[in-house]
Amino acid sequence: MASNRKKSRGESLFLRYLILGGWALFCLAPVLWFLSIGLRPRTEIITPQPIYIPTFSLDAWHMIWEDWPMGKYLRNSVAAIIGSVIIDLVLAIPAAYSLSRFEYKGRDDIGFYILSTRMMAPAIVAVPIFFLFRNMGLLDTIWALMLVYAAINLSFVTWIIRSYMLDIPKELEDAARTDGAGEIRILWEIIIPAILPGIITASVIAMIFAINEFLFTLLIASTPDAYTMSVALANFTGGSDGVIYNAIALVAFLAFVPVFLVVVAIQKHLSRGLTMGAVKG
Amino acid sequence: MSKTTLSEAGAAIAAPDTPTPRTFKRRSKRMKAALPYLLVAPAVIYLLGITFYPGIYAITQSFYEVKFGPWKPVGWANYAKLWNDHQFWQALWNTFIIGAISLTLQCLIALALAFYAYRDPWVKGWRIIFLIPMLFMPSAVAFIYKLMFLDGRVFSDILIRLGLIETNLAIQSSVWGSRALLILADVWQWTPFLFIIFVAGLQSQDEEVEEAARLDGASWYAIFWNISLPIMKPIIAVALILRAIDITTMFTNVFIITKGGPAFGTETISYFIYRTGFKFFNFGYASAASVIMLILTIIIAQFVVKRAFVSART
């Protein structure tokens, strides 16, 4: 009996590592290939036979900084993203406080309305948003990007923060309330410090979605004044040169590294954030 | 309840000091009732501006012919044209078929991976490795796949070396080949999303129940199927809905990898709207398609999403 159980466990262990290891390989192989593309000269990218062991070269690195306004793209991305996260937090924290702490008519409908905006396909609002920004004279500016990214992420951010607020025991604020503290002071001095992990998680997820955003940025930005990294990539096609893959690969890794580090730091909260608080992992 | 009585008592105590006790009391009471609305209002107004306003705008525009000159009213003509537009139906079908296959694959793979990973001592390590594809910009992922399968032909080359095929695959000219490529890129990048959520769901369940079942001689497989999976149902529903939303709005990969081709075989509804609006500048027509999408979205949101989120929270 004992040996039988041991055997079946051994088998399942083999299968387990075969499957997990196999998927890990599947995840990493394209990434490593792309990294090798970024570190080789252009002449070795598209060849009759793929070159598996290329010459090492930093051509692409020099190219992205010298031939393109990479610094500008980077600055646009960072400015638009940080601006949008600030807008989101300013709007979402009071909204989440209202949704999690008060009983009032229409509360659940308001909460669901905020959630449902996440379901809106970008393409549905693309045409009107384009005209809206054109009439406001905001086309091709990072202000427009900021406003759009904030709108895309607002539902997520609100629901994540709401979920963390629901976890705070009511006694904590009731004590403060008996001491005569107003609602705003309670929010600022008790609730916000207590849900800081939630606020950070929400900000990180909003940041990732903002970096990834493509359709709106493509429509809004038409010059390097507003290009972000995500859309700049699609423009690394120097006319007759075709797609400049090694430069694209390096920019991809340039954006990947900071995101990866931040996500590893908040790993514990990630599943909860990704489901807008529906899963308390 | 005790909250209101407490604050009322506070107001009553404070009242004698104020010059006009009655108005102060009434105003503060009205303030109290309005406060939650005031707190939530800025967010709601912002979202209305970016959803409701465009919705109205799109509905209005859909009854006009909007090209470069002034708007020309055309009644229901845009909708009638959509009804007869083969490419529109094709785009709906493409979105559905690519989305359905991709979502099914992602769900099954993520469940299997989560099942094997959540009891593993190195679960944190697996999680970080599996997460990597998700953290690349989608536009970068699209280029990775374009290079490997179309421009650089690494995939074909490896298959040739393994002796599985004889000549380069002509993925670009095959509808199902191109669809498979879009599906593969999506599965590669977004299966981790489901995996992370499923692992968290499995880890958060009561270990004692599992342990008891195991001592009764139930296999891991039986435990997973009969105990874990039913508990996980609401979580799976929420995760799949979030993923389904993103899959049905797929745009970046189509824009970079296939441009909707060949023969409109990979044109998703998002790409259709983009193409009619921003390539052919037929904005009224694009708006009509947007309105149809909007109606579908509202119906699905009301019936499916609301229920899933409510059951996941309780």
Image (cartoon, rainbow, N blue to C red):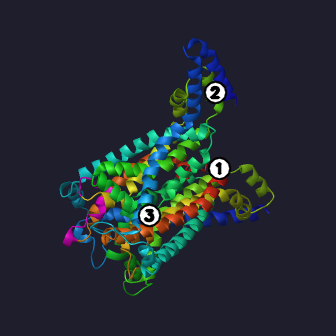
Instruction: Look at the picture and state if A117 lies above or below B277.
Output: above
Q: Which mark is residue B313?
A: 1
Quadrant of the drawing holding the N terminus of chain B: top right
Q: What is the span of residues highlighted in magenta in the rendered image?
A: A223-241
Task: For mark 1, name the chain.
Answer: B
Q: Which residue is mark 2?
A: A174
> Which residue is painted at 61% across and 50% down in the image?
A279
> Which residue is painted at 56% across and 42% down in the image?
A162
Camera-nearest residue between A153 and B81: B81
Determine if marks 2 and 1 fall on one subunit.
Answer: no
Q: Classify mark 1: residues with Cα within 10 Å, few (<14), some (14-19) or many (20+).
A: few
Q: Name the image quarter holding residue B112.
A: bottom right
**What percent of the width, then of the height, locates residue B294?**
49, 64
Q: Which residue is mark 3?
A: B59
Determine if marks 2 and 3 fall on one subunit.
Answer: no
Residue A224 magenta-highlighted: yes
Amino acid bearing label 2: Asp
Amino acid bearing label 3: Ile
Extreme bottom residue here? B166
Instruction: Look at the picture and state if B57 lies above or below A161.
Output: below
C-alpha distance separating marks 2 and 3: 48 Å
Q: Secondary structure at mark 1?
A: helix
Question: In the rendered view, does A132 fall on the left or right side of A179?
Answer: left
**What percent of the width, then of the height, locates residue A166?**
61, 40
Quick check: marks 2 and 3 in contact, CB under 8 Å? no
Task: For mark 3, name the chain.
Answer: B
**What percent of the width, then of the height, locates residue B248?**
49, 67
